[in-house]
Image (tube, rainbow, N blue to C red):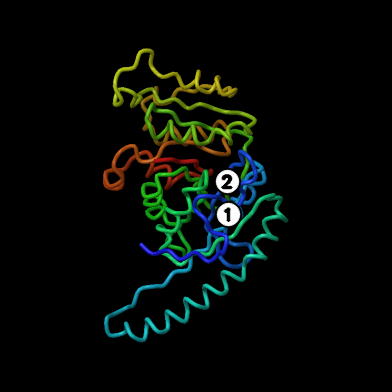
Amino acid sequence: MQIKVYRPDFAIVASPWSGVPDMFSLLSLASDTVPFGSAASFAADLAFALDAALTGLCAVRMGAPMSVMDAPTFLEDSAEDLRRQRNRAIAAEPAFLRWAHERGVSEASWRVVESPLDEALSVACDWHDAVVLGLADTGQDPWQRVSAVGSLLVTLAHPCVVVPPGAVARLSCVALAWNGSREAMRAIHAARPLLERAEQIVLLKSSETDAKRYGTWHPPFDLERYLDLHGLVAEVHTLGEAGEPAEWALLEAAEAAGADLLVMGAYGHRRFTEWLFGGMTQHVLEHARIPLFMCH
């Protein structure tokens, strides 16, 4: 894997805001023109709400030839197009920094990378706390489709904020989906900086949990105690008691609670199995109207 990053101060071992202690950091895909895309706009508003750092990542990509016969001409044209894309993206840095600061972001940085998008995100997410991904059924960006976002959730294995069209970055009420799984626990633990800013936390507990998958613990893990130890108080609701499918019950309960964000694990079962037979993650990605903080 070869990744070219166009920023002279790039370093995996130290983030651009390494002098700022305990600052939550967000990574967002961005286009090379204002307003830099819906995901970047949401990420900037969320960074302002959290007093977090924001990195805009612009991936410069070469397409694939239509046929073998067209390959020589295609490669020559693509190389020139790639050069233009790269230069335009690098030149966008001052505009992005100005745009981010105008939206209240105190620490912002810009990265341009020449690499397949999934590979670039896999590297860059290593020094960020969460990745912001846009989600849309229509549009020209194939990486915003449900299937692509689902693939990134699995590939990155990193906390991701998935943003459906028209979503607003608010933390008035945050809902936690809890089924006892490792994925859910990782998501809730990673979302603690957001939970600390939330005005209200609603814990949506499944009546059936995955806790027994991980052995028998004495005493069993108590999520409410975990939250209490971190100074977080949650209003508890139990789901699935009326026989309604869990995936529908979860989204309905989150909407009924007035949640601005839903924190949940992603793909506790194999992604192919969910794609083939349906499952919680696949359903939520297809139907959620509020942002999702997810972790695989």
Residue 64 x %, y %: 35, 73
Residue 120 x %, y %: 44, 58
Judge the density around disc 2: few (<14), some (14-19), many (≥20) Cα neighbours within 10 Å.
many
For disc 1, the marked residue is 55
Helix, strand or loop for disc 1: strand
Q: Which amino acid does label 1 sit on?
A: Thr
Would you say residue 160 is visible in this rendering? yes
Residue 208 x %, y %: 35, 24
- In the rendered structure, the answer to whether residue 133 lies left or right of residue 273 reads right
For disc 2, the marked residue is 25
Question: Across the whole image, how many numbered discs are drawn on residues?
Answer: 2
Q: Quadrant of the C terminus?
A: top left
Marks 2 and 1 sit apart, C-alpha to C-alpha, by 8 Å
Judge the density around disc 1: few (<14), some (14-19), many (≥20) Cα neighbours within 10 Å.
many
Q: Residue at x 38, y 16 (%)?
A: 220
User: Eyeballing the image, is 130 above or below 109?
Assistant: above
User: Eyeballing the image, is 264 above or below 239?
Assistant: below
User: Eyeballing the image, is 196 above or below 103?
Assistant: above
- Whether label 2 touches label 1, CB < 8 Å: yes
Q: Quarter of the image holding residue 87?
A: bottom right
